[in-house]
Amino acid sequence: MFKKILSTVFLILFIGTVTAYAQMKIGYMSTQKVMNQLPQRNQVQQKLNSFIQQKRQALQQRTSAFQDSVAAFQQNKSSMSDQQSKQEQQKLSQMQASLKQFQQQIQQQVQQRKSTLLKPLYDEMDSAIADVAKARDLDFVINKTTSAGDNIIYYAASEKLNITQEVINRIKENSSQN
């Protein structure tokens, strides 16, 4: 909450200072709305979901193997010596640590794959934003919301400053030309 208020105050101060010294043209847009309208978005989401499913299956296999080992230990514990029991507990502890590490690796791999798959979309969006900004002679383009979805721009005196639809149209034009 504090970051949100602080970023809003700095944005207002920045815009106020800039406009006091020169007439700067500032546009805004909703990157989330643009991303949702991209034709390639569904393909990227399907690839990511497929990758996540593969990783879930691998994790499930390891989890099942660990659970089977725990069940076997519980079943055979009474017939083991203290030393065998300690060794088996140590082995299970190592398996659990390995499973946790594997789970963290999967999370990192999913995040990396998501970044890799989304990068071309963000590059395309950046290019379209630059084209629209140049065409409208804008000095700055501000994202309407933060990555968490919190509003940065609560009010704009003119809807003419919103370039979201123009960016979407530019991307669709570029996609149909390719």
Image (cartoon, rainbow, N blue to C red):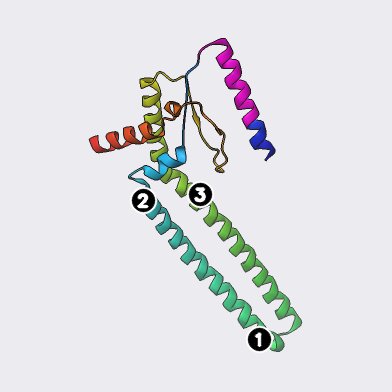
- The amino acid pointed to by label 3 is Gln
Q: Answer few, some or many: residues within 10 Å of disc 2's Cα (few below 14, many 20 plus, some between 14 and 19).
A: few
- Residue 90 appears in which quarter of the rendering? bottom right
Cα separation, mark 3 vs mark 2, equals: 17 Å
Residue, disc 3: 111
Q: Is residue 143 magenta?
A: no
Question: Which is more toward the observer, 157 or 166?
Answer: 157
Task: Please tell me which of labels 3 and 2 falls first in the chain.
Answer: 2
Cα separation, mark 2 vs mark 1, equals: 50 Å
Secondary element at tag 1: helix
Q: Residue at x 55, y 74 (%)?
A: 65
Q: Residue at x 34, y 50 (%)?
A: 43
- The amino acid pointed to by label 1 is Asn
Residue, disc 1: 76
- Residue 51 appears in which quarter of the rendering? bottom left
Query: Please, is residue 54 above or below residue 172 in the view?
Result: below
The picture places residue 66, in percent across and down from the top left corner, at 58, 73
Residue, disc 2: 42
